[in-house]
Amino acid sequence: MFNFIGKWFAYTKKSDHEDRKMFLEAVELMLDGEATPEQQKMVMDRIRRCQFSNSKYELEKCIREKLKSLNCCQDTPPHLSQAILQKISTQNSNQI
């Protein structure tokens, strides 16, 4: 989706790189509704301690919710999937 989150939750020390990576993955999973209870707790604990992280997390969450609401109400055209599959097949046969 958006890559703002990596910049918002950035750390300055290189030793925090692995911790940051694990946290960012947990944030993404949480926003997608796929985080484990442990990951959810880790994210919530961290954003409770940092107002900046909390405000950015809430902004990203609102952006995702708005995008989902805009896309969920529109039906796809009836032949769209067939057209996409046909183009993929054509591309694959041209490459062989």
Image (cartoon, rainbow, N blue to C red):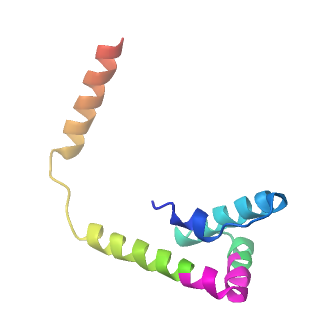
- Which residue range is magenta in the image? 43-55
Determine whether 7 is above or below 88 in the image: below
Q: Position of residue 68 (x, y in %)?
A: 35, 70
Q: Residue at x 15, y 44 (%)?
A: 79
Nearer-the-camera pick, 13 or 84: 13
Magenta span contains residue 44: yes
Nearer-the-camera pick, 12 or 63: 12
Q: Residue at x 56, y 78 (%)?
A: 57
Q: Position of residue 64 (x, y in %)?
A: 42, 72
Q: Residue furthest front?
A: 12
**What is the number of callouts on the image?**
0
Determine whether 93 is above or below 30 in the image: above
Nearer-the-camera pick, 30 or 59: 59
Magenta span contains residue 49: yes
In the picture provided, is 55 more to the left or to the right than 51? left
Q: Position of residue 81 (x, y in %)?
A: 24, 43
Residue 34 appears in view? no
Quadrant in which the C terminus appears: top left
Q: Position of residue 20 (x, y in %)?
A: 73, 63
Q: Residue at x 46, y 62 (%)?
A: 2
Residue 63 appears in view? yes
Residue 74, by quadrant, is: bottom left
In the picture provided, is 64 more to the left or to the right than 94? right
Main SS, magenta region, reads: helix
Residue 43, by quadrant, is: bottom right
Q: Residue furthest right?
A: 15
Q: Residue at x 60, y 63 (%)?
A: 6
Q: Residue furthest top?
A: 96
